Each structure stands twice: as structure tokens, then as C-alpha cells.
Image: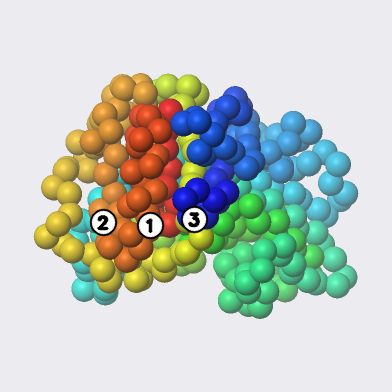
Amino acid sequence: EKTNGMQFLTLTITLTLTLLLTPPCGGFLAPSRSFPLPSSHKSRAAMSSRASTASTTTSRGSSASSTDPPGTITLFSPSKINLFLRILRKREDNYHDLASLFQAISLGDTLTMSLSSTPSFTCNMAGVPLDSSNLVLRAISLVLSRTGHGPLPLSVDLFKRCPAQAGLGGGSANAATAMWGVNELLGRPAPLEDLVEWSGELGSDVTFFLSGGTAYCTGRGEVMEPLPSLEGADDVKVRVVKVGEGLSTPKVFGALDYGGMSKRDPEELLREFTSQPLTSVPPTSYVNDLQAPAFSLLPRLSALRRRLEECGFDAVMMSGSGTSVFALR
């Protein structure tokens, strides 16, 4: 979509099975696609196969498509937004301690894994690495190594919908999905607790995507406290808009002004979101310490946020390190 010469990728998503189909603000943000959230709006990678109604759910909550042949599993890989993101301090190892409320959303990718005599890895999105540096393949190797299993001949296809460098955790979700999927194909040699423990080796956000959809994350993001679904989340619709450019997370952290960060206590923010309906949380509680440095690097983001606020959304904020901005109504 182009507006005043500015091009955006606009996605309408939900926290429920209800779809938002009517564009706000005179059509400025007319949706390009809409996505329902899987049953019970769960985050865990294998909670749904292709967000499909044709799925068979086990007692652990994993789902495989009823049409999948033996030795094949098709999984939904959700993305996330950060309802608040506080950067607490820079550590001696050059990572940062943070405190953030993560929420899974219905925009996501599809990962299909099959036992095959001709191993392969394919992806529909240009620019995604297809070698061993890819997080999906690294995740598979990690589970095989930790469970003492030898090489497993797999045909893996990743169908991407979540844009890259958006602050939506798409790559991290893919890694968590792959961990879950290969563990299922192996007959579940590892309990969920082990997958959660191992996931931190792949990236700070990977752990969240083995949660139930809502979690308070600390440390680098890998210390996860699962939370129940937020009250009133079923009534909230989310619009995600991404500018064409991306920003790398290290670049955004490099532009961080430590003196200009929020002084809000993350525990206080957490109480704001968990003690009342989501629709009652004041806009001032949507805090992201990475928003200001990202805006300084890419002023278009600030302009985009103002335009969304003018559309009358209840809350507007950048997700993660950007460059997507989400709006709630």
C-alpha cells in the first residue's frame, strides 16, 4: 500500500478467531491479509497445523494435520508483539537485561517436516539462508544432538508470511517450531522442559514460542514466566504495519540513549496488563525503550506511528526492535 509516497506492508491480525475486515480511518490501513489465531490463541509452535480446523490435538497440545501422510508434520509458527519492553541494563557480556510482556499473534508461518530419502530445505521468501546457518536447521541439529539421535533425513519446507526485520520474532518462532516438530517426529524423547532449556542457545526470543501464548520474559529474553491469557484479549484486534526498510537489532541497541529510557517499573507495568481487561490498559503503559533509537535511525517510523494515532487506535507502538508498528482497537 502507498500513502503520500510511503510504502507499507499492512497486516490485519487478531488475538481471537474473529477477523477485522473493515479498514479504519477512511481506508488508510486497508488490510492486505487477515489471519485467524489458532484454537485457544496458543503460542506453542505445534499448537496448530496451518491454523487449520482440520487438525487432531494430543494431550500435550500439539497438532498435526489430519491429511498429513505418515512421517510428515505441518505446524503453524506464530509471531509476537511486545506489549511493553523495558531495557534494564547493559551486561558485562554486552547483552542487555530486559523485561517484556510477550503476546503471540495470529500472523505466522507454516513449517512442514517430512522423513525423506532426499533431505532438503526450501523457503518461499527470497534472501532466507538455505544452509546450516538457518535457525530452522540449527534448531533441528540441536534437538538431534541433545537427544543423542544421529542424523535424520528430513525434507523441510518453510512458508513465510511474517516479514523479516519486523520485531515480530518470526525467525525465533521458526526455530521453536522446528524444535517441537523434530521432537514429535522422534517420538518425543525430550520433555517440553528440556526444549525450553535448550532453546536459549538459539536466540533470546526462541524460548517464548514454547510458551502458551502470553509470557513475561526477563534476562536476555530467555527467562520465561508463562502467564494466563490476558483478560479481554478476545475483544482486541491488532493491525501491524511495516515500512519497507528493516533495522538490525544490534544497530538499534547501538543507538540506545540510556539516559532517555523509561523509568517505569516493569513489575508495575506487568500489573497494569494483568489486573484489568486489556481494553482498559492506558496507552501510557505501552512502553518500548527501543522505539526512540529506532525512530532516530529511521524517522519514517515516527511518522507512521503518528498517522496510526490519528486513525484513533487505542494504543500504537513499535514491536521489538522494529520496523513494524502495531495498533490495537
Query: Is residue 7 shown above or below 129?
Result: above
Q: Which residue is mark 1?
A: 300
Quadrant hosting residue 229 = top left
Using residue 135 as the reference point, say whether residue 56 is left or right of it.
Answer: right
Q: Are marks 1 and 2 in contact (CB under 8 Å)?
A: no
Query: Is residue 324 shown above or below 225?
Result: below
Query: What is the distance, in whole Å, between disc 1 and disc 2 at their CAs?
Result: 12 Å
**Earlier residue among tags 1 and 2:** 2
Using residue 131 as the reference point, say whether residue 241 is left or right of it.
Answer: left
Q: Please, what is the three-letter code of the amino acid marked with disc 1?
A: Arg
Query: What is the distance, in whole Å, between disc 2 and disc 3 at their CAs?
Result: 23 Å
Q: Which residue is mark 2?
A: 292
**Earlier residue among tags 2 and 3:** 3
Q: Which mark is nearer the camera, 1 or 2?
A: 1
**Residue 247, label in figure:** none
Q: Is disc 3 placed on a helix, strand or loop?
A: loop
**Residue 5, label in figure:** 3
Quadrant hosting residue 164 = bottom right
**Earlier residue among tags 3 and 1:** 3
Q: Is there any visible trace of residue 194 in the rendered image?
A: no
Q: Please, what is the three-letter code of the amino acid marked with disc 3?
A: Gly
Disc 3 packing (10 Å; few <14; some 14–19; many ≥20): few
Using residue 185 as the reference point, say whether residue 272 is left or right of it.
Answer: left
Q: Position of residue 308 (x, y in %)?
A: 40, 39
Disc 1 packing (10 Å; few <14; some 14–19; many ≥20): some
